[in-house]
Image (cartoon, grey):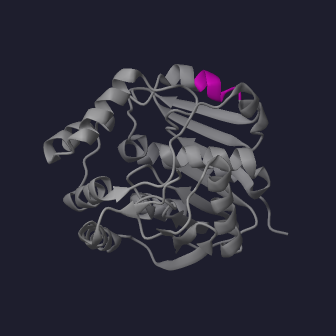
Amino acid sequence: MAKIGRFRNEAARTRFVRAYEALEAQWPIASTLRDVETSFGSTHVRQSGSGTGTPLVLLHPVGGNSLYWRNVIEALARDRIVYALDTIGTAGRSVQTAPVRGEADLARWLDEVLAALGVERAHVLGYSHGAWHATLFALRTPGRLVSTTLIEPGGVFVKPSWSVLLKMLRAGLRPTDRNMRRMQDWLTPGVTMSETEWELAMAAFRGFRMGVGWSRLLKDAELQAITTPTLVIFGGASVSGDAEAAARQARRLPNSEVEIYPGIGHGILDQIPGTIVPRVLDFIEKYEEVPA
């Protein structure tokens, strides 16, 4: 039976909201908050930036939310409106009221969000789990997309190893502070979370039951079907999968650019933002649509 994402209890929701509001105070630029209705519930949207560029939509990693992007939002929103979403069915300020029963529903959710925002076409950037969501959108609603950027799309081009899955499962079964910090250090080496970030991440992980599914490998026909210009970025030392093997698969996309950054882990956007953000912006600019 399909699930609806929810907090385990009211105390868990209260802890999460308190941590969310503390991190929200650190958002560095002016933003407008919007809650738009979809068939699956209300979606919380953080709108930042201005300019004539085609809008950019941001899809966060698992355990994250729209606030994940605060360290890079100034650069991303320099020439355009940027919409950072709290993905339905994940821990955030969105409120799921109907189950997401499969991949078609998730693509429909994002399509409805863009329609409610009045966005006809957009660039979409997804990181980790968000990259899977962006991939689904490219498969099912390509007419909405100008370009797609996938950062560390774990499980989309190659399967993670059983040892990786087992390590994550063990941490999830005993989510003590010590175990989770060890997991974070292993998964995203070179990335240090502030206490505010940590409190929010733990409030999400311990207190929320997700209502959306996990990624899967793309089939050969699906690789060929994604014709939207796509930038795929991998950390060469990421534990989420074999970067070289994943890159070979990603290059089978008909209109792709693929980058591997040696020695960098799954937390690539936090490790080397000064390298990744300009690369993303250059790619977006390459496919920018000129306003009529």
Is the residue 94 above or below the residue 107 in the image?
Answer: below
Q: Kindly tell me whether residue 247 is visible in this rendering.
A: yes
Place residue 256 in its image quadrant. Answer: top right
Place residue 218 in its image quadrant. Answer: top right
Is the residue 229 above or below the residue 110 in the image?
Answer: above
Residue occupying image coordinates x 70% and y 47%? 138
Residue occupying image coordinates x 22% and y 43%? 180
- The rendered magenta stretch, by its main secondary structure, is classed as helix
Camera-side residue of 201 and 77: 201
| Residue 119 on image: x %, y % | 71, 69
Is the residue 133 above or below the residue 5 in the image?
Answer: above
Is 66 within the magenta? Answer: no
Q: Kindly tell me whether residue 278 is visible in this rendering.
A: no
The stretch in magenta equals 247-252
Report the residue that reaches farthest toward the right: 292
Is 249 within the magenta? Answer: yes
